[in-house]
Image (cartoon, coloured by chain):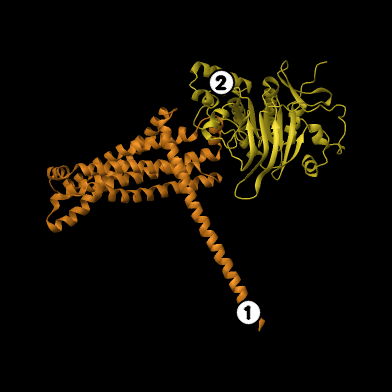
Amino acid sequence: MMETPQPADPALPPPIPPPLPPGPVLAGQVPVAPADPTPVVAFRNVSIAFDGPPVLDDITFSIAPGETRILLGPAGVGKSVLLKLINGLLRPDQGSIELFGEEIAAMSEQRLFPLRTRTGMVFQEGALFDSLTVRDNVAYQLIQEKVPDDEIDRRVHEALTFVELDNTFALFPGSLSGGMRRRVAIARALIHQPELLLYDSPTGGLDPITSTTIVELIVKERDVFRTPSILVTHRLQDAFTLCTHRFDTDLGRMVPIPDGKTDPSTTFLMLEEGRLIFNGSLHNLLHTDNKFVREFLE
Amino acid sequence: MRYPVEASEVTSRSTRAADRMAIEAIERTAKNIVSTVQDYSLFAQRAVTNLFRPPRYWTDFLLQCNIVGVGSTPIVLISGFFTGGVLALQSAATLSEFGATSVTGRFVSLTMIRELGPVLTGIMVAGRNASSMASELGSMVVTEQIDAMRALGVDPVRKLVTPRLFACVTMLFFLTILADAFGITGGAFVTVFMNHQNGTQYFSQAWEHLTYSDIVQGLVKPLVSGFIVASLGCFYGMRTTGGTEGVGRSTIDAVVFSSVLIIFADFLMTQVLLTLFPPI
């Protein structure tokens, strides 16, 4: 039987059941992807502060190949800081961070540049270069590598087609809407076929329909390329949509995963006042007895 | 009689607390100054040494030469011309008391070439370009474009700062020559058309008393001024914090500190150059 196409509205979060005692895996629960011996990203006891109390305190987690992590938490809890620590845009005060198996906590900026080219990052507001066209923004990395113009144009068209914005090729970012800017930013992050994707609140400040379009692109990227990623958000509906939907390549759109199942490779992290208070699957998140998590979900 | 004793204890305790707070404030300020100087030194060193290692962004260099050089030409020419004119007016009034109006050309050319040309051009370019560099880079910082550049594997200091630095140094050198030339022309204009003196005498005085050391003094200074303008403009831009308000603050800091530093550096360089090339 064909799956029913999902309407454009964001999926509503599933009802929150009461907390469960630790026990055997329940029916319908999809097990979390097993931890890989060589994670793409590994944080060990990472802390960072900016002239005050720690923004992040003793954070330990990892991202396995093919895994999508959703980082939840209220605004100002340190989610974007954590994301910037992953690719070395910020340096921790304590702890160890491994990116692609290399320790980057104390790595020089010059040595970090080649490592960063293996990652793609989508910033909160897109962070497109105002003085460059969409083509030059998306192709920024390729232009630096002196890739021939024909090859650049072809790959930019491919990336823009992926985010369904091929008609913006020659436009400047100033003439794009907020949602279009985020989609161009996703195209820029994808063009170099990164080995890790970092999404910093890609739906923040957008209307629900545009948010769903962005989430659909992220689901598409996850299911088509299987790139490991971490997505920062404080919007539960986006997080649940990511977890409960998959991209149907035949239909060319995002559809719900049948039988109430969730994507096994999509798991959750949650921060509270700089500390990691949750690390696990959607099922565990919904059944946790952590008071803060339950308040956040409600 | 316990009350007076307790009162004096309270007073001395609050005095000690006030002293401690004052010392802490001084310590904090001193640390901030030292830290800023250290950051600036490292930043400037990175910007300079980047020129000697690939990749080099020659297109950005030429673009900045156009922005700094061509863009600043009108204000530099106009300010140079009128400065020369004012010098001629003022000097002629004083020199006439000694019957020495014939040396107006010498006075104007030496003053323009050795001091006013380099300093005025530096300050004009600082007002125009240090502010634009600080605000442009500051806006890029607050909109995360600098972070985006780093995330894309491009060194923003190499891509944005180094071309600006070398373009500013190169262009300020030529702008100073233009300012000197237009200053002397302005002086000539006033001398001939307002003071009704001999133009040939003015130019021969301006030319004949010019020495090699005057030229060296006049052309070393813009190199340093150019470095100050671009490095401080970019430095304050790149360390912008606090959104659009922070961009405004960075712009003010860049213009104020670069202007003051140009004058201070001019004083130091004049001392050194006068020692190296003593007046005959």
Label 1 sits on residue: B5
Q: Where residue B270 appears, x then y in whole percent? A: 28, 49
Numbered tag placed on residue B256 in the rendering: none
Q: Judge whether A157 appears above or below B183 on screen.
A: above
Q: Say what secondary structure mark 2 lies in.
A: helix
Nearest-to-viewer mark from 1 and 2 = 1
Q: Can residue A101 be seen in this view?
A: yes
Q: Which chain carries label 1?
A: B
Q: In this view, does A101 lie to the left or right of A140?
A: right
| Rendered image quadrant of residue A68 | top right
Q: Are marks 1 and 2 in contact (CB under 8 Å)?
A: no
Q: The orange chain is which one?
A: B
Label 2 sits on residue: A156
Q: Which residue is drawn at 32% across and 44% down?
A: B121
The span from disc 1 to disc 2 (Cα, nearest Å) is 82 Å
Disc 2 marks a residue whose amino acid type is Val
Q: In this view, does A236 lie to the left or right of B196?
A: right
Quadrant where the image shows the C terminus of chain A = top right
Q: Is residue A210 visible?
A: no
The one of A69 and A24 positioned closer to us in this rendering: A24
The one of A294 and A210 positioned closer to us in this rendering: A294
Disc 1 marks a residue whose amino acid type is Val
- The color chain A is rendered in: yellow
Q: Which chain carries label 2?
A: A
Q: Say what secondary structure mark 1 lies in.
A: helix
The one of A76 and B275 positioned closer to us in this rendering: B275
Q: Is residue B95 left or right of residue A285?
A: left
